[in-house]
Image: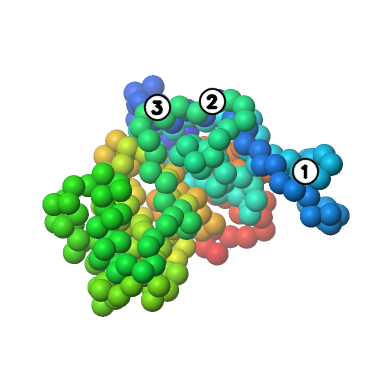
Amino acid sequence: MAESTNTVGGENTLPPNANRTPKVIVDGAFVTYRVFASGKAIPENSNQSRVKKTGNLRTVEAVKDVSLVAYEGDTIGVIGSNGSGKTSLMKAIAGLNPIDQGSIFAASRPAFLGVGAAMLKDLSGEKNIILGGLAIGLSKNQVRNKLDEIIDFAGVRQFIELPMRTYSSGMVERLKFAIAQAREHEILIVDEALSVGDSEFRRRSEARMKQLASNAGTVFLVSHSLKSILATCNRAIWLDQGEIKMDGNALEVCEAYAEFAGTTIEE
């Protein structure tokens, strides 16, 4: 299995893996999707190795033979191009995607925060906070005590009594993250949720994820922003065509990916 290194920028940030408890183990996992063919030809630039056509069905191999171990205190960035299998792997770890082969073990039920998470559009922001807080395991009193903190974290105080349908997509995603971070999670998966906020919101979110991981939690962050990965994560996993291409020190993995993608970490 691929295991983490424990340095960022050459400085030790975590004790050796032997001294830490595994929180997530993925062993030879495969995730495939079976969809009806459209009848259109597969584009020449598509990944032929991941798409197999049988009659009117196509089988897309989204995750292929992935193995990894995530330890307590790990904050793991998950990077790769669109369609590389990042969200499919994270949903499999969270139990939202079935796997076709292999095994996934988790110390507790992972909390998955993605851009597709549901909010009730006809209810106010405040009522959605109450329902969301109850859904992540807070009591009614705990939600009430954290209400102002959540509102201010999301930066939506002037809209909090309005129905969610009046919120912009960015405001909705900020509120989702603010709700999710209101309690400690043993395993938290954040999928692109930080791409919707301004620099101040990203700064608060990055600091909070570091805090969650330092409290013996494990955080996965899926992001196209290598800058956010480096600001947050001690480790990175680069997925390519459904497989792990590189797993290790966040700086080393991000630099390798940036060179491969022809971009820079700052972009």
Name the residue tied to disc 3. 22
Between 66 and 96, which is closer to the camera in this rendering?
96
For the residue labelled by badge 1, is the local secondary structure a helix, a strand or a loop?
A: strand
Q: Nearer the viewer, residue 212 or 258?
A: 212
User: Label 2, on which residue?
Assistant: 103
Closer to the camera in the image, 55 or 7: 55
Image coordinates of residue 98 in percent, x first then y, are 55, 35
**x 37%, y 63%: residue:** 120
Q: Residue at x 57, y 44 (%)?
A: 88
Q: Residue at x 39, y 22 (%)?
A: 18
- Residue most extreme to the top: 18
**Residue 2: quarter of image:** top right
Residue, disc 1: 57
Asked whether, in this view, residue 177 is left or right of residue 138, the answer is right
Residue 252 visible in the current orientation: no
Whether pointer 3 and pointer 2 mark residues with C-beta atoms closer than 8 Å, the reply is no
Identify residue type, mark 2. Answer: Ser
Report how many numbered discs are placed on residues in the image: 3
Q: Position of residue 205 (x, y in %)?
A: 34, 57
Pick the quarter of the image with the N terminus: top right
